[in-house]
Image: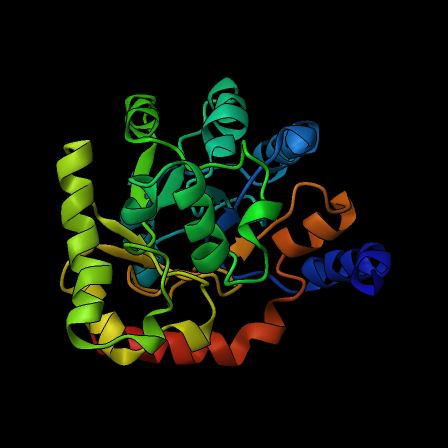
Amino acid sequence: MLRHRIATPWYMAMKMLRAIRRPQPGFRILLFHDVVAGDAGEFEKLVEYVIRHHGTINPGEVGGMAEKLASGSSSSGNWRAPCLFSFDDGFISNSQVAAPILEKHGIQALFFICPELTELSGQEQRVAIARNVFNGRVKANALNHNQRLMKWEELSCLRAQGHTIGCHGMAHRRLSELGGTQLEHEIIAAADLMDERLDQKTDWYAYAFGDIDSISGEAMETISSRFQFCRSGIRGLNNAGSTSMSLLADSLLPAAPIAYQKLLLEGGVDFRYAAAREQYRKLSQTG
């Protein structure tokens, strides 16, 4: 891919720019999906790189960091932003592959799930994953039979390890296509079901698909009425202009070249998402 080939010179140019212009303080949320066993080695290398060069934060620190950034009191000797690890969709690989690596390195992360899909099993769940999560781009019979979602017991184990379980919508539906009682079901009823199954208060929401076209003002109002935090999939640094309801995230693929991953971690493609970030920020103010 072209973006992979030009990542190294692009990254070096950014480092030179950093030397003459002080970067904004802030933090990044890293977004992963199905971290398969074959990518475990690359995922751990990425985790180690983030720890060594950026540092990590856990979900419980986000509220305090956002307040410090908003007040202008946040400062750090490290010009690279610390990172919070997050995982969408609830695939079993999150528990079997990613979680042991995170535990080894003392990292607490966010795992977003769709409770209605979690309650399904076997072929019924595979059909729902193909239709809702992959948006019909993958057929159910093309999914690996091990490509299932975590069960409630496995999610409870993650909680016991100190991780946070957030809501990704009742059934991974695009919120911008819903309204009224459908939105209430996808957002509020989903949180209520998670509270019941996991014996918790669900404070985090990450809306399905994550792009600016998948969220609406009505959806933001509904999310803000029930949740403390809302995370998108829009790239960017969470800084003084961010709120708990307009959190950004950078999607990463463990198998991608490390030079490209470094570029993303440094915000090398953030400029492409400036308009989406501004629109998302304005939507979040409706809540």
Is residue 7 or residue 12 the one in the foreground? 7
- Picture coordinates of residue 266, whole percent (x, y): 64, 55
- The image shows residue 99, relative to residue 287, as above or below, that is above
Is residue 16 or residue 189 the one in the foreground? 189
What's the residue at 70%, 48% (across, down)?
262
- The image shows residue 101, relative to residue 249, as above or below, that is above
Q: Is residue 64 visible?
A: no
Relative horizontal placement of residue 183, taking residue 18 as reference (left or right): left
What's the residue at 71%, 57% (across, down)?
19
Q: Is residue 187 visible?
A: yes
- Picture coordinates of residue 85, whole percent (x, y): 47, 41
Relative horizontal placement of residue 202, taking residue 21 as reference (left or right): left
Q: Quadrant of residue 202?
A: top left
Coloring applied to the structure = rainbow
- Picture coordinates of residue 50, whole percent (x, y): 60, 37
Q: Quadrant of the C terminus?
A: bottom left
What's the residue at 51%, 48% (across, down)?
30
Is residue 170 or residue 105 the one in the foreground? 170
Is residue 16 or residue 125 the one in the foreground? 125
What's the residue at 33%, 70% (across, down)?
175
Tally the numbered discs. 0
- Picture coordinates of residue 78, whole percent (x, y): 56, 44
